[in-house]
Amino acid sequence: MASLQDHVDDDQATTASSDWIKRILKKDYDIELTMPEDRLFPTPSRALYVRWIASLLNSTDPSWYENFDAESSAQPCPQREEIAGLDIGTGASAIYPLLALRLHPQWFMYATEIDATSLCYAHDNLVANQLEDRCKVLQRTPTQSFVPDADELGQRDLDFVMTNPPFFASVHEWQASLSGTGKERPPDSVCTGAQTEMVYEGEGEGGGGDYDFALRLYRESAQAENVRAQWYSVMFGKKASAHRFVAHLQMAQCFNFATFLLGAANRTRRWVVAWSWLEFRPESSISRTESAPPSLNPWPTDYSIPNQSTQSTRCVQGEVMRILSELPPPFEMKWNQTLGSGVCRTTEILWNRSYRRRAKLIAEGKVPPRSQQEISEAKKKPVGLGVEIAVEEERVLVRWRQGSQRVWFESFCGYVHEQLRPLMASGASSSERSTEANAARTGMTSEGETATSSSQHDHGSTIKAKSTTRSEDESIGQADDSTRKRRKIV
């Protein structure tokens, strides 16, 4: 089977005929497609959106800690199988459900559509591909919510929501785009879409178009009680709309988001923005787009500690295990020595100055240690920070897996970095390493209490300690329902 990327450039550079599209879909995905002449034909590149969603879900598995295998001898490739997704405005082709179900045999899809003609064709296309049992198509009206309620879906939880909304805010804007008004060159392709597929006038507040559509979905997601999804996503046809929407997420203090760019330079591009109200963080290679400006990307979730010494990975791994094992409950850790990686999580900060001072007083017998009841109560709190650590040949990589507060992640990375500095620093002698390591073990080093900014991140990003917002300083030890109630709806 040819890769999708083999067709992307041709798809976006030429006027794609319906026959050409049908042949590619049949050859690469075994999809039979029947379309009316006055509705939008899908492009095979839409599979990139589906594949990115799959990567996003695999990267944010809520069972990431429980599923970690400390005995495995092979690098795990996590794949979430039983996934339920929703495509808002599926169109006559139902292309996203078709691609999602062909690529992932264990997935189930829901699809909504307001246009009666498109709805009939969407159902027929699912039947023609023998996928009607794995996709439920629902007719909606413009005044109904984008996400159907639990009674209509038959379940309360979705793994993701995706949508390719109308890009234009008015018929006038749409017609101007078709004629090439205001553009340096005429359009590359012929648009066969109906008005319902091309124009979303919205409520006026957001100006209509894809931004207003995304804004409405965001507000539904923030207020959702009946049906909730882990990830909501929108494909934008305008770069300005994507930038504007990311700025809105940040202003509304929704910091767990991801971006994806579909399209090559100097060709038709699409920008996908996804956001989540849960605290499971995707890895930077999935959530950040290298070619996008910093304003469009979320915080990095990878922190790299370079090994500038000649120490072996076995030696570094032993030191990392020692550092982590010395953190008291409710800190939890699983470690795989064969792979040189592990996972950790905690409900409390156990590495800052106050905790280390208390540990010293306990060791001196000046204060009593925590009782088992106190430890048990601490473990019942929500996870405040979850990380994955991998010891590689030239670095130690710390990846943020769970938690809402960046300051916890930065603080932990700074602590581990400072503890490893005596061993991994460039040019340090054996005696210097021994002296500094002993000082670090007894808590005598003055650094490491807060995050450092000296370590480079993947993709050239750098974590910097910054003053946090009021939202970031709120206690992490609150239930998830309480967290949802604190959302700022803008």
Image (cartoon, rainbow, N blue to C red):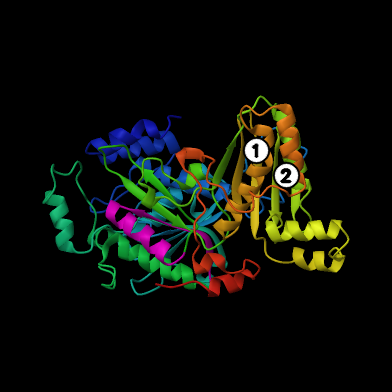
Give amino acid for label 2. Answer: Ala
- Residue toward you, 232 or 484: 484
Q: Tell me which numbered mark, 1 or 2, is placed earlier along the sequence.
A: 1
For marks 1 and 2, give the CA distance.
9 Å
Element under label 1?
A: helix
Q: Are marks 1 and 2 in contact (CB under 8 Å)?
A: yes
Residue 143: % across, % down: 35, 75
Disc assigned to residue 421: 1
For label 2, the residue is 440
The residues colored magenta run 226-253
**Residue projecting furthest to the top:** 310
Quadrant of residue 417 within the rendered picture: top right
Quarter of the picture holding the C terminus: bottom left
Residue 84: % across, % down: 54, 56
Q: In the shown orientation, is residue 188 left or right of residue 251? A: left
- Residue toward you, 408 or 84: 408
Give amino acid for label 1. Answer: Arg
Element under label 2?
A: helix
**With respect to residue 73, does 227 lie above or below?**
below
Residue in the picture at 77% in, 61% down: 358
**With respect to residue 64, does 120 lie above or below?**
below
Disc assigned to residue 43: none
